[in-house]
């Protein structure tokens, strides 16, 4: 028997093969057009893979007899949806900055992919510092990020003197201002009173 002289082929794992099918369009049966007009991107995928992870997509695919082609998703970013697709196909996702992480969380929240929501929250928690905490807290409250909110509270309480004297503190909305005053702030009474006075001067009723 003649032996082959070529190099042995590298075998793909099942997740790699499935993702290869997606990238090449093999056996895909659903298309998405994601993003606002002028900033859209198209994605092809397999309904079965997506439905296994997302109860929202499972219901959409199983109960709707008339699904548009492509499915239009204008309220999330193409970067967030790209990370969602990569995650559902077992690939690594890249949260390179806070903006991408927030967009990815919004997408995971929309489609109720809890594992990706948790992974994204853990990344955002690492971005919480005394300099970023007020901005991130507002995002966390709006999107109901429980882990991120807890991290923000801890940073605010432990670094209250620095945060209360920051320019960002004077610009926070009333709801965040009221939330902060209920915390156990590691600051003197004088620092807190001065911060309140400064905030009220910047936010006249």
Image: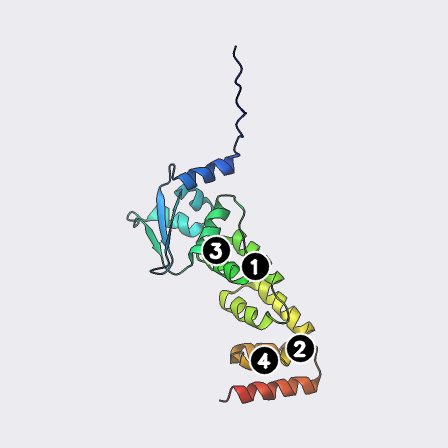
Mark 2 vs 1, N-terminal side:
1
Q: Residue at x 54, y 52 (%)?
A: 94
Q: Secondary structure at mark 1?
A: helix
SS at mark 4? loop
Foreground disc of the pair 2, 1 = 2
41 relative position to 144: left or right:
left
The first of marks 3 and 4 along the sequence is 3
Asked if labels 3 and 1 touch by Cβ distance under 8 angstroms, the answer is no
Q: Which residue is mark 2?
A: 162
Which residue corresponds to mark 4?
167
Image-based side of 73 in relation to 102, left or right: left
Q: CA distance from mark 2 to mark 1?
A: 25 Å
**CB-based contact (under 8 Å), mark 4 and mark 1:** no
Separation of residues labelled 4 and 1 (CA atoms): 26 Å
User: Which residue, given by chain and number where applicable, does mark 3 sit on?
Assistant: 108
Q: Which one is earlier in the sequence, the residue at label 1 or at label 3?
A: 3
Q: CA distance from mark 2 to mark 3?
A: 34 Å
Q: Secondary structure beneath disc 3?
A: helix
Label located before the other in sequence (2 or 4): 2
- Density class for disc 3 (Cα within 10 Å; few <14, some 14-19, many ≥20) is many
Figure quadrant of residue 136: bottom right
Figure check: 51 above or below 119: above
- Provide the residue designation for mark 1: 121
Number of the front mark, 4 or 1? 4
List x then y, in percent, for residue 4: 52, 18
Q: Is residue 102 above or below residue 91?
A: below
Tell me which label, 2 or 3, sits earlier in the chain: 3
Q: Residues within 10 Å of mark 4 (few under 14, many from 20)?
A: few
Q: Residue 114 location in percent, x, y?
A: 52, 53
Task: Determine whether label 2 and label 1 are within 8 Å by CB.
Answer: no
């Amino acid at each position: 028997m003649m032996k082959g002289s070529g190099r042995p082929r590298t075998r793909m794992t099942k997740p790699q093969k499935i993702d290869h099918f997606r990238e090449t369009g093999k056996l895909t049966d659903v298309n998405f057009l994601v993003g606002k007009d002028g900033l859209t991107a198209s994605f092809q995928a397999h309904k079965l893979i997506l439905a296994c992870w997302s109860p929202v997509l499972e219901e959409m695919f199983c109960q709707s007899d008339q699904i548009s082609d492509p499915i239009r998703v204008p309220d999330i970013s193409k970067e967030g949806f790209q990370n969602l697709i990569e995650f559902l196909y077992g690939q690594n996702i890249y949260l390179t900055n806070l903006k991408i992480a927030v967009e990815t969380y919004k997408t995971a929240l929309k489609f109720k992919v809890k594992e990706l929501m948790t992974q994204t929250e853990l990344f955002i928690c690492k971005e919480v510092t005394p300099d970023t905490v007020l901005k991130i807290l507002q995002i966390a409250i709006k999107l109901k990020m429980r882990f991120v909110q807890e991290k923000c509270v801890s940073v605010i309480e432990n670094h209250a003197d620095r945060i209360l004297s920051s320019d960002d503190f004077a610009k926070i909305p009333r709801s965040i201002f009221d939330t902060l005053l209920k915390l156990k702030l590691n600051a003197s009474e004088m620092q807190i009173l001065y911060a309140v006075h400064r905030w009220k001067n910047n936010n006249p009723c």
